[in-house]
């Protein structure tokens, strides 16, 4: 009788070990997918890289595993409550990589990627391997294609151009004519005049794919302009 009980206990222990190992495997898979997503971001010198995305994916998978399987002894437990908190909570982390400078917003794609990476981790943690892996690879593919394919990735962008000149009237006339030729829209103008020079701050909307550095280099060679940046 004692041997039978011992055999049953050993079987239960081994079964539980195998079961928990399978759950732990989900966290590893989620972390690997998060690493791949982060690698694409890091290759473009973004703020959140491999470690951030891997940890987000593993954390989301861990919380899903605990939410779904850690409270089986509690009757009528709602496992979806933890999942809902992950979705809302990860938004605070994504907000930390969004920056606004000179009316130009950066980091939105990375923030959205972190949020989607959490979703990938949740899918793996819930045991939907096909959906999680498929979504992870689709996320990577989307980021690559929409960044590298010119007609898909290019879009108008906004930036500030600052310059100082001692020949305001002639420079601003020629500059606005240049903007008109290059399809650059002037959204706002700020002018600060002093005794010797005039500082101009232009809020510009550049066409898709336009290289603003070429504009700065071109006008920096104009001797009437003391300084220019943007």
Image: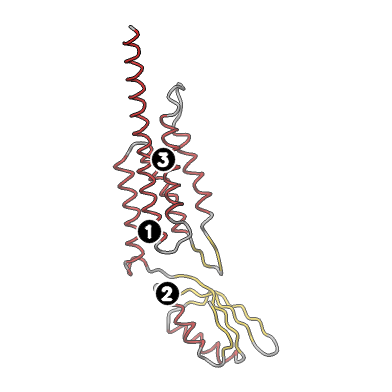
Asked if the residue at tag 1 contacts the one at tag 3, i.e. Cβ–Cβ closer than 8 Å, the answer is no
**Residue at image point 39% right, 62% down:** 43
Distance Cα–Cα, label 3 vs label 1: 21 Å
Q: Residue at x 51, y 64 (%)?
A: 105
Left or right: residue 217 versus residue 200 is left
- Above or below for 170 versus 112: below
Q: Secondary structure at mark 3?
A: helix
Where does the image place residue 143, in percent across and percent down from the top left?
36, 59
Between disc 3 and disc 1, whose residue precedes?
A: 1
Circle 1 residue: 40
Circle 3 residue: 61
Residue 56, labelled with which disc? none
Horizontal and vertical percent position of residue 125: 38, 38
CA separation, marks 3 and 2?
A: 41 Å
- Closer to the chain start, of discs 2 and 1, is 1
> Are there few (<14), some (14-19), or many (20+) residues within 10 Å of tag 3?
many
Disc 1: CA contacts within 10 A as few (<14), some (14-19) or many (>=20): some
- Disc on the earlier residue, 3 or 2: 3
- Badge 2: few (under 14), some or many (20 or more) residues near its Cα, within 10 Å? some
CB atoms of marks 2 and 1 within 8 Å:
no
Give the quarter of the image for residue 62. top left
Q: x, y percentage for residue 148?
A: 33, 66
Residue denoted by label 2: 207
Near-viewer residue (59 or 213): 59
Q: How is the image coloured?
A: secondary structure
Of circles 2 and 1, which is in front? 1
Mark 2–mark 1 Cα distance, whole angstroms, equals: 26 Å
Which element carries disc 1, helix, strand or loop? helix
Query: Where residue 93 appears, x then y in whole percent?
Result: 52, 50
């Amino acid at each position: 009788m004692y041997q039978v009980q011992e055999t049953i206990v050993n079987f239960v222990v081994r079964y539980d070990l195998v079961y928990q190992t399978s759950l732990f495997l989900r966290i590893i898979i989620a972390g690997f997918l998060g690493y791949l997503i982060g690698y694409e971001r890091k290759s473009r010198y973004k703020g959140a890289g491999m470690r951030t995305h891997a940890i987000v994916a593993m954390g989301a998978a861990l919380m899903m595993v605990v939410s779904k399987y850690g409270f089986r002894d509690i009757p009528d437990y709602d496992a979806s409550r933890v999942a809902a908190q992950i979705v809302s909570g990860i938004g605070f982390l994504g907000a930390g990589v969004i920056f606004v400078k000179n009316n130009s917003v950066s980091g939105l794609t990375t923030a959205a990627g972190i949020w989607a990476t959490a979703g990938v981790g949740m899918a793996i943690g819930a045991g939907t391997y096909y959906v999680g892996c498929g979504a992870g690879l689709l996320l990577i593919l989307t980021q690559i294609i929409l960044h590298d394919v010119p007609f898909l990735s290019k879009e108008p962008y906004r930036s500030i151009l600052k310059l100082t000149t001692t020949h305001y009237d002639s420079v601003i006339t020629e500059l606005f004519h240049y903007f008109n030729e290059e399809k650059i829209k002037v959204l706002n103008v700020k002018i600060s005049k002093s005794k010797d020079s005039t500082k101009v701050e232009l809020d510009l909307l550049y066409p898709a794919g336009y290289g603003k550095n070429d504009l700065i280099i071109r006008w920096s060679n104009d001797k009437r302009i003391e300084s220019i940046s943007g």
